Image (cartoon, rainbow, N blue to C red):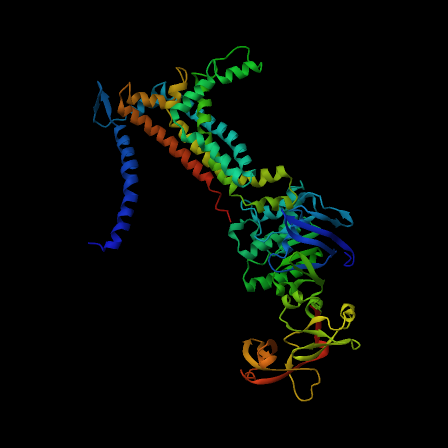
Amino acid sequence: MNQNTDLLTLRSVSKSYGTVPVLHDIDLSIKDGEFLTVLGPSGSGKTTVLRLIGGLEPLTSGEIRLDGQDISRMPINKRPFNTVFQDYALFPHMTVSGNVGYGLSVRHIKRKEIARRVAEALELVQLGRFADRFPAQLSGGQRQRVALARALICQPRLILLDEPLAALDLELRRQMQEFLKSIQREIKTTFLFVTHDQEEAIGMADRICVMQAGHIRQLGTPHDLYYKPNCEFVARFFGENNLVAGKLGPVQGEQRPIETALGRLVCSISGQPHLKAAPDGARAFAAFRPEALRLADATDDGNRLYGTIADLAFAGSSTVATIMTGADNAAQRLRLRMPSRIDGSALKSGETVSLCFAPHEGHLVLA
Amino acid sequence: MLPRDRRLPLLVTVLAFALPVLFVLVPLAIFLVYSFFGVDQGTIVYTPTLGNYVRFFTDPIFLPVFWNTIVLCVSVAVICILLAYPSAYFLTTLKGRWRYALLMLLLVPLLMSYVIKIYAIRSILGLNGFLNKALVALGILHEPSTLFVFNMNAILLTLSLLLIPFAILPIFLSLERIPQTLLRASDDLGASGLQTFLRITLPLSLPGVASAASFVFVLAIGDFLTPQMVGGISGFTFGRILYSQFGTAYNWPFGAALSVALAIVVICAILIGERFGRNRGTSI
């Protein structure tokens, strides 16, 4: 498995239902062995991407290539991919081992061989003891694992997961996330995981593909998406963020100022040529994370902001302050996240504060 | 006196239990009691006896007819299932409005008078009927055959035609209840269309098939009118014997005993249908 070769390539793939377009000219490459998450709000077309790859629906135009060969018209049962469905779609009249072995038995593999591989797969998903149960006798998390074992037993080139954790409660979802990730590392199969939950995406993915309204907005590592969002949508959708609108000033080396209603803010543009190339006066946003913002002391020389504290919310390990700034300290809302302290916050609601963030922790997003 | 607002629910509860008892269980019990009486010169003798049952089991006429009737009705059920399953399956492949429009069309015969339908079918099966004319025209027969009217074949064909709607409906409902994602999952795991049908669709629709079979069997075995009208002399069924005991023979106690035998078979058929109608509690 070479992480740098492309397993699957989508080339200008479009999909419409009747006259309603849901995907516009999608280009996407999935690398062999990676855990790729497709993230987007509902209606963004993420599930459609998965269904097109799985062969559950035909393309309207474009092509899908596997190892360089066009498989756009290959029927679903010939594609070397398997899907974990959102509602698991376990066969209710078969036992757990019947379900897991289904993909092998329709290929007329010998009974003994099936039994061996089913036992192996159930061991992998830690369900060895449940082989003879029926799906109705299992909990949600167990059904989930049966669905996973059923998909991976055929040794597919790619496993497609359609929001498989959506129906589980929070604690179980966390466990399953770790579990999925560890299984993916163990069997070294490519996973394509569709979700609307960005925390889930950050936790598991090697790369994340953010979709909105039938377009791919950004594709990159979770770190890239978090710190270098390339558009307002990604900056707002992916994690909590402070966005301040303004106009770009002249480039200063690896930094560039932006004139905003809150004053001039200097942000890093290192490694992002499109920000360097943007003309002076172009409309943009300064973007900085709540954890990058902190209370300023007299010696700080970063970007300075002033406002009043509107609200303090204790969230366990951290405390989030909502701060109103701008004209009359009411025009713009900012969030500041700081570690919680056992003796309570030094801040009080209604207090006027001076804040700052370092230029290298700020980022620019073109409007 | 109960408070006003609790009187109505109580009344409803009492009626819900009383009506079936009054109109179903009590008549059945009366029949059961009558089956132990005798008849002398056309009047019922009210002394308990097992004579009716002894006659049923020992007389050379009744048991063979009883058995032949069961075989006939099982055949009707099998024919109905074989014809209804493809129709019901075809219905589920249709989309939206068409599906229900066609289903209604298939169920329209249920709205028509039973007797008229039997007459219509009899004219199709008769010597100059559509079936004979078609077979002659196709060169399968040289001359019209009497094979299809006034015998067991006629009863078999007529009952099957009459009862098909009762088979289509439960099969259609069970097929429609199968979630589409199960079929997609089967495709996704590499199964061919035939494999998906044989291993997912068919097993999951068996409860509907079982209900359909027991429906058709029960309706067929209780029918005396159809055999009477298309069976002629050779098409003698248990229903006709039973009917004659209450009419021409005027032997109610013996008729009651035959009814009890029939009721036992019907109850068994319903229980078997019910047993296979449930899918081992494995639905999600």
Looking at the image, residue A210 sits to the left or right of residue B5; the answer is right
Residue at image position (36%, 32%) is: B264
Q: Nearer the viewer, residue A77 or A153?
A: A77
Q: Is residue B224 above or below residue B133?
A: below
Residue at 67% in and 89% down: A298
Q: Where the C terminus of chain A falls, by quadrant?
A: bottom right
Q: Residue furthest front?
A: A281
Residue A110 in the image, given as x and y percentages of width and height: 67, 41
Residue extending farthest to the bottom is A298
Query: In which quadrant is the N terminus of chain A drawn?
Result: bottom right
**How far across and down, in percent of the image, does residue A323 sit?**
58, 79
The picture places residue A259, in percent across and down from the top left corner, at: 70, 77
Q: Residue at x 72, y 59 (%)?
A: A34
Q: Residue furthest left?
A: B1
Above or below B144: residue B1? below
Q: Residue furthest top?
A: B143
Q: Which quarter of the figure has residue A187?
A: bottom right
Residue B95 visible here: yes
**Residue B252 in the image, given as x and y percentages of width and height:** 27, 24
